Amino acid sequence: VVSLAHDGAGIPVIKQEAVLETGERLATSVDASLDGTRIATSVSGGTLLIEYNAKERALRELCTWQTDFSSDSEPCQGVVRFSPVDSSILATGGDHGFVTIWRVGKREGAP
């Protein structure tokens, strides 16, 4: 997660806010929810859902699930996007040739 600020002379400065290691999983697409509290990324043949706590500047992995079911080759999830009007809707697309719509709920006890 990065933030854009301006220095004393009004020049834009990009600052790194938080980092989450994805390990051996190649992240090919990233999108943030409207409110900025959730981040989705395409990793290998699936989707990684991350929670962002701006106050603590911390990222936490919520879950990962397979979203590309290609039978011809190694699954490769290529695109992940939150709906621009409803952050509980996530669209994914990969090598299997389908766009899939997912409903992503909030964890229990979350605001």
Image (cartoon, rainbow, N blue to C red):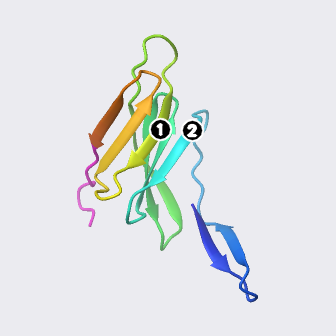
Q: Nearer the viewer, residue 51 or 41?
A: 41
* Residue 76 as seen in the image, left or right of residue 110: right
Examine the structure image and report whether residue 109 is included in the region drawn in magenta: yes
Quarter of image, res 87: bottom left
Locate the N terminus by quadrant: bottom right
Quarter of image, res 24: top right
Q: Are marks 1 and 2 in contact (CB under 8 Å)?
A: yes
For badge 2, the amino acid type reads: Thr
- C-alpha separation, residue under disc 1 versus residue under disc 2: 7 Å
* Residue 78 as seen in the image, left or right of residue 111: right
Q: Is residue 62 visible?
A: no
Q: Position of residue 64 (x, y in %)?
A: 41, 38
Up-down relation of residue 103 to residue 46 (above or below): below
Q: Nearer the viewer, residue 16 or 56?
A: 16
Read off the residue under disc 2. 28
Locate the C terminus by quadrant: bottom left
Read off the residue under disc 1. 79
* Residue 25 as seen in the image, left or right of residue 15: left
- Residue drawn 23% across and 56% down? 108
- Residue drawn 48% across and 70% down? 54
Crowd tier of the residue under label 2, counting other residues whose Cα lies within 10 Å: few below 14, some 14–19, many 20 or above? some
Mark count: 2
For badge 1, the amino acid type reads: Val
Q: Position of residue 104 (x, y in %)?
A: 29, 47
Mark 1: which secondary structure? strand
- Residue drawn 41% across and 46% down? 81
Q: Earlier in the sequence, mark 1 or mark 2?
A: 2
Examine the structure image and report whether residue 55 is included in the region drawn in magenta: no
Which of the numbered marks, if any, corresponds to residue 56? none
Q: Position of residue 84 (x, y in %)?
A: 35, 57
Q: Is residue 52 visible?
A: yes
Write down the region rendered in magenta. 103-111
